Image: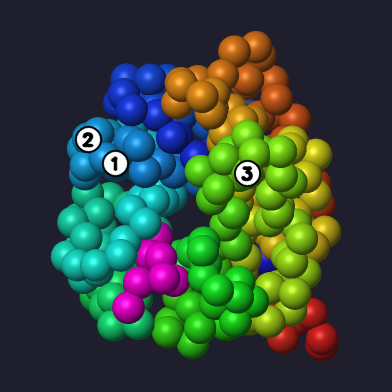
Amino acid sequence: MKPTVQISLDLTGIDEAVRTAAMAVRAGIDWLEAGTPLIIAHGMHGVRELKARWPEVPVVADLKTMDGGWLEAEIMAKAGASMVVVMGQAHSETVELVVKAGRDFGVKVMGDNMAMPDPVDGARRLEELGCDYVIHHIGYDMRNVQRERGLHPPTPLDRLREIVEAVNVPVQAVGGLTIDQAIDTPRYGAPLVVVGAPLAIDASSFRTAGGDVEKVLRLICEKVHSFGDVPIGKERHS
């Protein structure tokens, strides 16, 4: 699989999300993510606005669905989402219903293993339930609170190779990665590179970060796209 770069638009205003998305598209980004703060603030309208402006660019709706799976997936699919996110900590039935809605409406499903008791077993479960992608996710609050307490929180890289080996679907690593770490995730076998806080979004204010963000995004895209094909699942052993 060719590596892809996704920008997480964890912003609360549609206008700022659109400006940041325009910058990201110019830089060569592959997927736009309507982040959870944007969806909380504006619901389907943020997704619809991104899709209307860039109809050729896939849009991820980071719903973090825990219940009402079919309905939430239907709403975002009809707004133009290409992918929706369901949490592995949800009931199995919820994951199954999001997957069913994905099939019904032609959208892909990303299963998020955040806070699952064992992230590797959780990734396997998400694939078994029908998810098209697995997100290996270390949560924002957990990372920050642990640092405040003088602890060293885990990073998505800690068990990323195990997760990649455990599933036959593409994997994405999310949660506090540095620029170099994000660029390097295809080397672990995870081709879906996501950039957001703190790379392009100011994590403390959920606004676009300062500095030459477009230049940084362009560099990330160039490096990731030059990586070459990343074998997925059985391809790794063929």
**Image position of 36 with respect to 94: above or below:** above
Q: Extreme front residue here? A: 149
Q: Extreme top residue here? A: 211
Residue 99: where, in percent of width, then height? Answer: 34, 76
User: Disc 3 versus disc 1: distance between alpha carbons?
Assistant: 27 Å
Compare marks 2 and 3 and give the one earlier in the sequence. Answer: 2
As shown in the figure, which amino acid type bears the numbered disc 3?
A: Gln
**Disc 1, disc 2: CB below 8 Å?**
yes
Q: Which mark is residue 138?
A: none
**Image position of 138 with respect to 215: above or below:** below
Q: Which mark is residue 39?
A: 1
Residue that numbered label 3 is attached to: 146
Lateral position of residue 185 relative to residue 88, left or right: right
Q: Residue 90 lies in magenta, yes or no?
A: yes
Q: Nearer the viewer, residue 137 or 5?
A: 137
Compare marks 3 and 1 and give the one earlier in the sequence. Answer: 1
**Image position of 207 with respect to 64: above or below:** above
> What residue is shown at x 60% (from left), y 62% (from top)?
136
Residue 175: where, in percent of width, then height? Answer: 61, 47
Residue that numbered label 2 is attached to: 42
Residue 35: where, in percent of width, then height? Answer: 40, 41
> What residue is shown at x 77% (from left), y 60% (from top)?
158
Q: In this view of the protein, can residue 105 be seen by the observer? A: no
The quadrant where residue 167 appears: bottom right
> What residue is shown at x 63% (from left), y 44% (from top)?
146
Residue 137: where, in percent of width, then height? Answer: 57, 57
Determine the secondary structure under disc 2: helix
